[in-house]
Every structure is written in C-alpha cells, then in structure tokens.
Amino acid sequence: MLDWIEELIRDMGYIGLAFLMFLDTIFPPIPSETIMPLAGFLSMQEAQSMNFVGAVIAGTFGSVLAAVVLYYLGRVLGIERLKRWSRRYGKWILLDEDEIERGFEWFDRNGKAAVFFTRMIPGLRSLISIPAGANGMSLGVYLLYTIPGTGLWVIALAFVGRALSENYDNVTNVIRWATYATVLIVIAIIGFWVLKRKRSQG
C-alpha cells in the first residue's frame, strides 16, 4: 500500500494527497499515519513535487471534506437508520452498530470538545462526524472545531516525516508511539475537562 500511496502523491501532487486524506477519513484502512509523514518526507527532497505548507493545506482539506460528508450522512439518516444501514453494509467500511453507538455516546458526553480532540485520535476522528450531524450541530460550529483539530494532526504527522528525513523507514514505529502518546494526552485533557465541568455544576 505504501508504494501505491507514494506513487499517487508523486504523480498527482496536492490533488492526490487530498484524495488520499479524503479516503483516510471515509475508509480507515488507508491510514493518515502513513500518508502525511510521506508527504512531509517528500517535501524535503531536492526534486520535490510539493512544499510543506502546501502538503498541510491539501491534507487538511481532504480530511475536512470527508468529515463534512460524514456529518451530512449523520444529519440525513439519523441514528436509527444509521444502525440499520451499518447492519447491512457496515462490513464494507468497517463500521458496525456498536461503533455508531459509541460515537453517539461520546458526543453526548463531550459535545464540542469531542469534535476537536477526536480529530487527533485514529478511528474516532471519522466516527465523531456522524453523531455531530445527527444531533443537529450546525455546520459552522462543526467546522469551527473540526478544522483546527484536523490541521494540528496533519501538521504533526507531516512534521514527523520531514524530521525523519533519510530515516523515513522508521516512521511506522515513531507514528505508533506518537499515536499512543496523543491518545493518552487527549484522554487526559477530556477527563480533566469533564471533571471540571461536573464540579462546576455541582
């Protein structure tokens, strides 16, 4: 898959990168953890087909565009129809009924903060879009939290690929541990925010 991703980015440049990040959000087996570090790495090469800033913009655009598609999917279908749809077609996009339930529960507990922080958590960054749409969050508010969260994640991944440079072969291990650290940090921040909110309400 890595060879195909690299070939597409080299051949199509920013359009190919945006397309891959769109697929990453819609179809999780195509990982942004591979796509954006590769783009950052390619921006360092002498015969570069893209620059770092352009790669970040293209990657963010593709990911946000897919997030908007999922947002409208949730808005149009609603939770009950989504569950029925996942029972029939979920195996094709690796999205089952339990995952939809968890996404809605997560959104109900954390609201806007969930939209922002889950953009940096693999898997959840796609799922959170559906309850955001189904629960009637306005598109403007949704984008207000989605774009910065997505942008931070894209910049971090691209920077890892750029920083590793000639050691790009080690990117998988670096991204794996960086992802673990990111998930722990985000969970800690959300936990602190929820605890603070409960104390203020009590």
Image (spheres, rainbow, N blue to C red):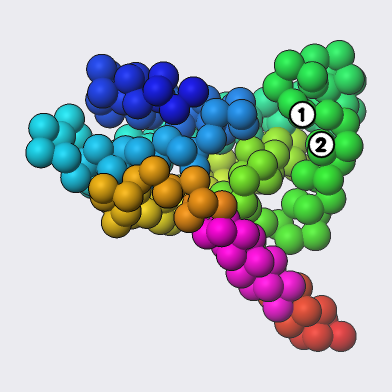
* Amino acid type, mark 1: Leu
Up the image or down, 181 lies above or below 172; here it is: below
Amino acid carrying mark 2 in the image: Ile
Looking at the rendered image, the quarter that the C terminus falls into is bottom right
Q: Which residues are magenta?
A: 177-192
Task: Give the quadrant of residue 47.
Answer: top left
* Closer to the camera in the image, 179 or 166: 166
CA gap, disc 1 to disc 2? 7 Å
| Circle 1/circle 2 CB separation < 8 Å | yes
**Front residue (pair 172, 110):** 172
Q: Is residue 128 among what the camera can see?
A: yes
List the residue tagged with mark 2: 100
In the depicted structure, whether residue 185 falls above or below residue 55:
below
Among numbered discs 1 and 2, the one appearing first in the sequence: 1
Q: Position of residue 130 (x, y in %)?
A: 70, 36
- The quarter of the displayed image where residue 127 is located: top right
Residue in the picture at 73% in, 82% down: 196
Q: Report whether 54 appears left or right of 149.
A: left
Q: Is residue 198 magenta?
A: no
Residue 84, x across and y down, in percent: 89, 20
Q: Is residue 170 left or right of residue 111?
A: left
Principal SS element in the magenta part? helix
Image coordinates for residue 177, horizontal then vertical, percent: 56, 59
Q: Is residue 41 left or right of residue 118?
A: left
CA neighbours of label 2 inside 10 A, class few (<14), some (14 to 19), many (20+): many
Residue at the extreme left: 46
Crowd rating for badge 1 (residues with CA inside 10 Å; few <14, some 14–19, many 20+)? many
Which residue in the structure is indicated by mark 1? Answer: 95
> Going 17% across and 30% down the picture, which residue do you hit?
49
Q: Residue at x 74, y 26 (%)?
A: 94
